[in-house]
């Protein structure tokens, strides 16, 4: 859990369980070009300065290398944590869905 005074983005990545291969892969997420590996269904906090940021999430696959890539732009105010939800697509060639909560 994050302190209320922290500024950043909290990303939670999910997928439909019948897409079972994703149980073996870990999602990658980042803000403004950074890249962190995380776990599915686990909120990941990434500290950022206040301002507008581009949040990206994908999972590694064979072809394409960055499958299900989703991107959203969020505005983060000082002392605010913006929550972002990512949902992996059913087919690896499609984009994932991302939205700020």
Image: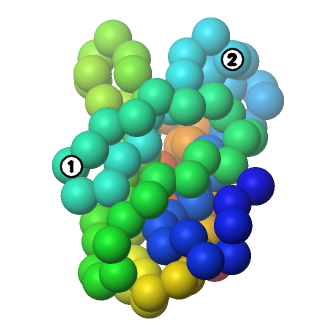
Q: Point out the image quarter for the N terminus.
A: bottom right
Q: Is residue 77 visible?
A: yes
Query: Does residue 66 lie above or below 43 as drawn?
Result: above
Q: Nearer the viewer, residue 81 or 83?
A: 81
Residue 71: percent from left, percent from top: 35, 60
Element at label 2: helix
Residue 13: percent from left, percent from top: 61, 45
Q: Is 57 on the left or on the right of 39, as rendered?
A: left
* Among the two numbered marks 2 and 1 on one chain, the one whose residue lies closer to the N terminus: 2
Q: How is this picture coloured?
A: rainbow
- Badge number at residue 33: 1
Residue 36 sits in which quadrant?
top left
Within 10 Å of disc 2 (Cα), the crowding (few <14, some 14-19, many 20+) is few
The outermost residue toward the bottom is: 77
Q: Does the residue at mark 2 contact the one at mark 1 (Cβ under 8 Å)?
A: no
Residue 31: percent from left, percent from top: 33, 56
Query: Does residue 15 lie above or below 23 as drawn?
Result: below
Q: Is residue 71 visible?
A: no
- Badge number at residue 23: 2
């Amino acid at each position: 859990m994050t302190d209320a005074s922290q500024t950043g983005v909290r990303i939670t990545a999910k997928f439909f369980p019948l897409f079972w291969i994703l149980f073996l892969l870990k999602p990658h997420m980042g803000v403004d070009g950074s890249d962190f590996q995380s776990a599915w269904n686990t909120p990941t906090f990434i500290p950022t300065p206040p301002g507008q940021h581009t949040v990206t999430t994908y999972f590694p696959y064979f072809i394409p290398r960055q499958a299900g890539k989703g991107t959203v732009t969020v505005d983060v105010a000082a002392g605010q944590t913006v929550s972002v939800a990512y949902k992996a697509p059913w087919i690896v060639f499609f984009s994932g869905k991302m939205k700020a909560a």
